[in-house]
Amino acid sequence: MKETNQNEAVNEAVNEAPDTAEAAELEALKAELEAVRAEAERLKSELKEKEDKYLRLAAEYDNFRRRSREEKEATYNNALADTVTEILPIIDNLERAAAFTDGEKVKDGLVMIAGTVGTVLERLGVEAFGAAGDKFDPNIHNAVFHEEDDSEREDEITEVFQKGYKKGNRIIRFAMVKTVN
């Protein structure tokens, strides 16, 4: 509405102008006004395109974050399910061993379970460490007892109370050991 009033005012001024110099100046102003309006329309269109592009990019980023979160949750759930699947045979063997009343069969069952546990840990990529005779390493061993014995080597592990476990370079549990010297 404002533009229409301005156009009308310019047209009236051109029509009422007494001399041609003023009319020419008004025509030049009218042409300049049209050029400015055309530039404003172009800039409005460009701004609308940029806003649309920004909104699409923001929506795409939100979708990416949602997908990443869902993939992370799915990865965790899949890893958990895979681990439990590997542990189920151990549980089955424990239940079978508990059903035995003969001490020798229970012992055999426990030996079988220990073998199954080792196999499961191996399939999961978990490695046991910490054996008697190994050199003590404070980065992977937790020395809970220490004794002096000149017949043994310096910083040697003489007894293992709990094995340590690691996956790759990550320590899952430190080995609990007894050292000498």
Image (spheres, rainbow, N blue to C red):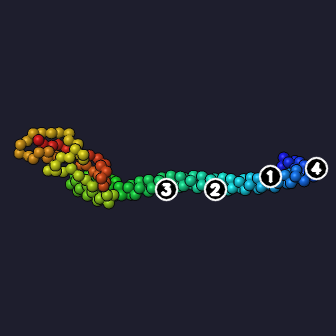
Gap between marks 3 and 4 measured at Cα: 78 Å
Q: Which residue does the image show at 19% across and 44% down from the upper left?
A: 177
Q: CA distance from mark 2 to mark 3?
A: 27 Å
**Residue at the left extreme, as displayed:** 151
Q: CA distance from mark 1 to mark 2?
A: 30 Å
Give x and y (percent) for residue 113: 27, 56
Element at label 3: helix
- N-term mark: 3 or 1: 1
Q: Nearer the viewer, mark 3 or mark 4?
A: 4
Lateral position of residue 64 relative to residue 169, left or right:
right
- Local packing at callout 4 (Cα closer than 10 Å; few below 14, some 14-19, many 20+) is few
At horizontal 35% and vertical 55% (from top left) the residue drawn is 87
Residue at the disc numbered 3: 71
Question: What's the residue type where badge 1 is placed?
Answer: Leu
- Whichever of callouts 1 and 4 sits on the residue coming sooner in the sequence is 4
Q: Mark 3 Cα within 10 Å, few/some/many (few <14, many 20+)?
A: few
Pointer 4: what residue? 18
Q: Earlier in the sequence, mark 2 or mark 4?
A: 4
Q: Which residue is mark 1?
A: 33
Name the one closer to the observer, 137 or 26. Answer: 26
The answer to whether residue 113 is seen in the rendering is: no
